[in-house]
Image (tube, rainbow, N blue to C red):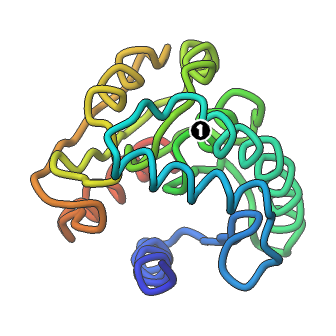
Amino acid sequence: MYPRLAERARHTVAQGFAAATIELPGGGERPRIPELERARADLRDALHDKQPVDGIVDRLVLPLVELAVPEWQAALDAVLSLPGIGGPVGFSGGVIAVATRLAVVEPRISAAVLFAGSYVPRVMFADARRVSIPLLVLLQWDDEHNDRQLALDLFDAFGSAEKTLHANTGGHTGVPGFEADDVGRFFARHLR
C-alpha cells in the first residue's frame, strides 16, 4: 500500500495541505496480532468457498476499529501540536469502518473521503447514521475485495447532510488518478 499512500500524500501536500498517515495495528512492519491474522485467513477461506462472512468480518474489523481509532486520535494530537499545523482536519482513506468511527468520535475532523473497499460489520451502521460531516465516498464497482451492496447500504446509512458517492469501474486498487483532483476540490471546499 505504501506507493499508493505516498502518492496520495504528495498530491495532498501539493495542494497546500499537511498530510500524515499511520499503519494499521498489525500491518506493515508492526507486530502481527494473531487473532487478526486468523480472522484474515478465515475471511479469505470463506470468500473462496462462498460462505457467509459476517461473523468473521466482526472478528477482524471490530478489533481493528478499537485499536486504530485511539492511535489516530493520538497521531492527530501529535500533528496538530507541530508549529504551523492547524485545523480544520480532513480524513482520507483507510479501512472505512475505522474512518466511520473516527468521523463520529473525533470532533476535529470536519470532512472525510472514504474508500468503500473493505467489509463493514453490520453494527457499524449505527455509527454511520451518527456521521454528520461532509463525505466523499469512492467505490470501485468491480472491487474483488468488497461487497458492493454492503458499500451502497453503508453510503445510504450515513447521516451526513452532504454526502457524495463516486463509483468507478475497476478493481480494488484501481481508483482512477483523476479522483485525486476531486478529492482536492472536496477538501478545499470544506477545510479552507
Q: Would you place residue 31 above or below residue 130 in this image?
A: below
Query: Relative to the observer, which residue lies in front, 89 or 58?
Result: 58
Instruction: Please name the residue that numbered disc 1 is placed on.
Output: 56
Quarter holding residue 157:
top left
- Identified at 60% across, 24% down, the residue is 124
Query: Relative to the observer, which residue lies in front, 166 or 12?
Result: 166
- Identified at 78% across, 46% down, the residue is 69
Q: Is residue 164 left or right of residue 158?
A: left
- Identified at 60% across, 30% down, the residue is 55
Residue 135, percent from left and from top? 43, 34
Q: Amino acid at mark 1?
A: Ile
Quarter holding residue 156:
top left
- Identified at 34% across, 46% down, the residue is 49
Q: Is residue 133 left or right of residue 63?
A: left
Residue 137, percent from left and from top? 35, 40
User: Of helix, strand and loop, which one carries label 1?
Assistant: helix
Residue 11, percent from left and from top? 40, 77
Number of other residues with Cα within 10 Å of mark 1, as a class: few under 14, some 14 to 19, many 20 or more: some
Residue 96, percent from left and from top? 52, 43
Q: Would you place residue 62 above or below residue 133 in this image?
A: below
Q: Would you place residue 3 above or below residue 111 in this image?
A: below
Q: Is residue 20 left or right of residue 140?
A: right
